[in-house]
Image (cartoon, rainbow, N blue to C red):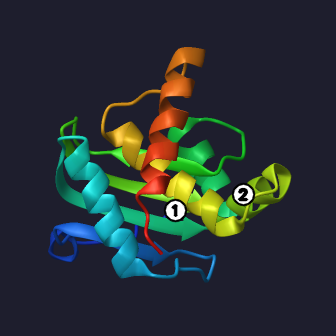
Amino acid sequence: MTIDWPFDTEAELEAGISFHDEDARFLPAYPQKLHSWIENIIKREDCQLQQLTYIFCSDQYLHQINLEYLDHDTYTDIITFPYAEPPLIHSDIFISVERVRENADTLKVPFEQELHRVIIHGLLHLCGYPDKTEAEARQMRAKEDEALTLLDL
């Protein structure tokens, strides 16, 4: 399986935030509210939006990306491809809808809550927050929790 990026030409790369589905037949509800929320978090983190594309896909699709581009033979809920350094936000973020659904079931939280957490998790990485150490992971979780309180659906 060869991975095709969602955009083929520079003309397709418009400034802002966009949501696409690859093979999952899924797009999040309330895209305008999500746009506003994500833009708010970017501003709160003193970052600048160039282009942010969320691509929703299946476990199989994201696993193939993990193998092909990162040489990781694991399933994951999110892979973030940053094209700029903070404070600039320019990235493709791939999210496995299947993995998010499974994680929500495991954590016994609503699917939408877990989806929103994963959406903002990728953004926070782009804003410069790592999560490799225990202390970094705690800070990331606190930032996610703070961001989730700002989402008004």
Percent x, y for residue 84? 22, 41
Q: Amino acid at mark 2?
A: Arg
Q: Foreground mark, 2 or 1?
A: 2
Q: Earlier in the sequence, mark 2 or mark 1?
A: 1
Question: Where 58 sits versus 147, above or below?
Answer: below
Question: Where 5 sits versus 92, above or below?
Answer: below
Q: Secondary structure beneath disc 2? A: helix
Residue 3 - label: 1
What is the count of numbered marks?
2
Residue 24 left/right relative to 11: right
- Residue pictured at 18% horizontal, 55% vertical: 49
Percent x, y for residue 86? 22, 36
Q: Is residue 133 visible?
A: no
Name the quadrant of the N terminus: bottom right
Crowding at mark 1 (Cα within 10 Å: few <14, some 14-19, many 20+)? few
Q: Amino acid at mark 1?
A: Ile
- Residue pictured at 53% horizontal, 60% vertical: 116
Pointers 2 and 1 in contact (C-beta within 8 Å): no
Residue 99 - label: 2
Task: Compute the Cα span from label 2 to label 1.
Answer: 19 Å
In depth, the one of 19 and 119 nearer the eye is 119
In depth, the one of 148 and 128 nearer the eye is 148
Crowding at mark 2 (Cα within 10 Å: few <14, some 14-19, many 20+)? some
- Residue pictured at 37% horizontal, 76% vertical: 33
Percent x, y for residue 89? 23, 48
Q: Secondary structure beneath disc 1? A: loop
Q: Is residue 147 visible?
A: yes
Percent x, y for residue 34? 39, 70
